[in-house]
Image (cartoon, rainbow, N blue to C red):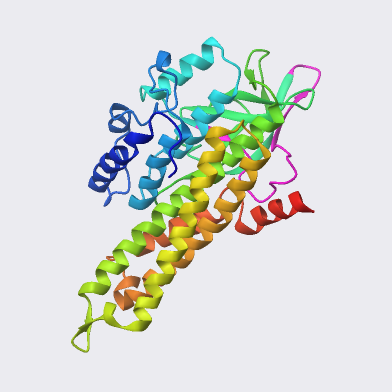
């Protein structure tokens, strides 16, 4: 990752500590939430006066990549990547600051209902606030919302009465609100549908974005896309390392299979794909950190990274399965976990096709 702040010199140390900590929970594909809080990972971007580290998304990116490498479960995507990102994008307020502090301390988990599918270019939000005469109501639906069914606090990005996006906090038990787990192949993460059927919205139940609201929403979608690209990069790196080590020890015809030219070519292809993905993801992180939320160049970089890295991860995991032979398809090998996670990454927050369509629209 390219250096981006005064924290750049600690990236290697952060990566080393993260890899060691997450490796301990690799078999369960989950990690203790309090341990993440005590490590300071939940409040990396939270301002220091709110018990955070005051760092940037570049530092969060290190943790996301390591979580992909270890196929770690938990609510980090919903709470830190989306939750903290959304709270930092809205105008400061006492209740917002209180929630940021609670996240940094590990006292609560958050989910954010954002557009997660292929309709990236339209800019339409899945929720809206309506005045039905007897009061304000929230209506709409979003699918595949990360960590929504388990979160203690739910934030919904919705079109306000004047059409401008706002962030509405909806208590999970509200009348008219339905949150249901959605089954996916990836067993390491959980997503849910969120349906608001005329949920009562109080006059002080939402926050306004600081600055350009439409640009802020684009920035959140870009942030989510880059996070998924980072996860895919971690998956690809793990599979390259696993496959190369296996090729060194697995023998056929009294020779390590890594000495065969065909196997060398496959491993080289895996490494090239991963290296290109790392470059594109690094550029996207730098664009998010250095530019304003929703910046056009940041959106371009995010779509490039998401479209390439997620497809590269699927290709690399597929080659890992082939080069491991029959054992690669067994439950014990663990490769199936990364294959399913890479498949969800490819579709979550826009497929490669949707992101390429988004790029093409810019140049049309």
Foreground of the two, 316 or 160:
316
Q: Is residue 114 magenta?
A: yes
Rendered location of residue 51, percent (x, y):
38, 17
Left or right: 92 with respect to 259?
A: right
282 shown above or below 255: above
208 shown above or below 313: above
Q: Say which residue appears at 56% left-offset and 50% top-offset.
A: 348
Foreground of the two, 238 or 131:
238
Residue found farthest to the left: 254
Residue 134, image quadrant:
top right
Rendered location of residue 277, percent (x, y):
49, 56
Q: Say which residue appears at 68% left-offset and 13% top-offset.
A: 203
Whether residue 250 is visible: yes
Q: Is residue 74 magenta?
A: no
Left or right: 223 with respect to 239?
A: right
For the C terminus, the quadrant is bottom right
Rendered location of residue 44, percent (x, y):
40, 28
Whether residue 182 is visible: no
257 shown above or below 303: below
Q: Say which residue appears at 24% left-offset and 44% top-offset.
A: 20
Foreground of the two, 295 or 106:
295
Residue 135, image quadrant:
top right
Q: Main secondary structure of the magenta part?
A: loop
Q: Say which residue appears at 50% left-offset and 55% top-offset.
A: 344
The number of numbered badges drawn on the structure is 0
Residue found farthest to the bottom: 253
- Magenta region: 111-135
For the N terminus, the quadrant is top left
Rendered location of residue 236, percent (x, y):
41, 59
């Amino acid at each position: 990752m390219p250096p981006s702040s005064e924290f750049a010199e600690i990236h290697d140390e952060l990566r080393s500590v993260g890899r060691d900590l997450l490796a301990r929970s690799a078999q369960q594909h989950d990690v203790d939430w309090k341990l993440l809080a005590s490590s300071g990972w939940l409040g990396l971007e939270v301002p220091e006066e709110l018990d955070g580290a005051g760092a940037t998304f570049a530092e969060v990116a290190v943790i996301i990549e390591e979580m992909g490498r270890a196929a770690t479960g938990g609510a980090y995507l919903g709470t830190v990547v989306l939750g903290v990102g959304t709270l930092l994008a809205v105008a400061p307020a006492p209740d917002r600051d209180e929630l940021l502090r609670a996240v940094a301390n590990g006292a609560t988990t958050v989910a954010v209902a954002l557009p997660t599918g292929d309709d990236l270019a339209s800019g339409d939000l899945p929720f809206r606030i309506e005045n039905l005469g007897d009061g304000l109501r929230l209506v709409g639906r979003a699918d595949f919302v990360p960590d929504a069914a388990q979160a203690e606090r739910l934030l919904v990005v919705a079109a306000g009465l004047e059409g401008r996006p706002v962030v509405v906090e909806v208590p999970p038990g509200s009348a008219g609100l339905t949150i249901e787990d959605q089954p996916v192949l990836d067993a390491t993460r959980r997503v849910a549908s969120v349906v608001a059927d005329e949920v009562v919205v109080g006059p002080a139940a939402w926050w306004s974005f600081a600055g350009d609201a439409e640009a802020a929403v684009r920035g959140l979608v870009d942030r989510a896309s880059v996070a998924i690209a980072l996860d895919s990069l971690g998956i690809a790196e793990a599979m390259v390392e696993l496959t190369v080590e296996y090729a060194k020890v697995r023998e056929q015809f009294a020779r390590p299979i890594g000495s065969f030219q065909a196997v060398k070519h496959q491993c080289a292809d895996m490494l090239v794909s991963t290296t290109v993905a790392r470059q594109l993801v690094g550029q996207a992180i730098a664009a998010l950190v250095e530019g304003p939320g929703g910046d056009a160049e940041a959106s371009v970089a995010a779509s490039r990274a998401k479209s390439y890295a997620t497809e590269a991860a699927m290709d690399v995991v597929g080659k890992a399965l082939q080069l491991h032979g029959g054992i690669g398809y067994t439950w014990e090998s663990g490769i199936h976990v990364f294959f399913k996670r890479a498949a969800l990454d490819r579709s979550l927050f826009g497929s490669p096709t949707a992101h390429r369509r988004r790029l093409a629209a810019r140049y049309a």
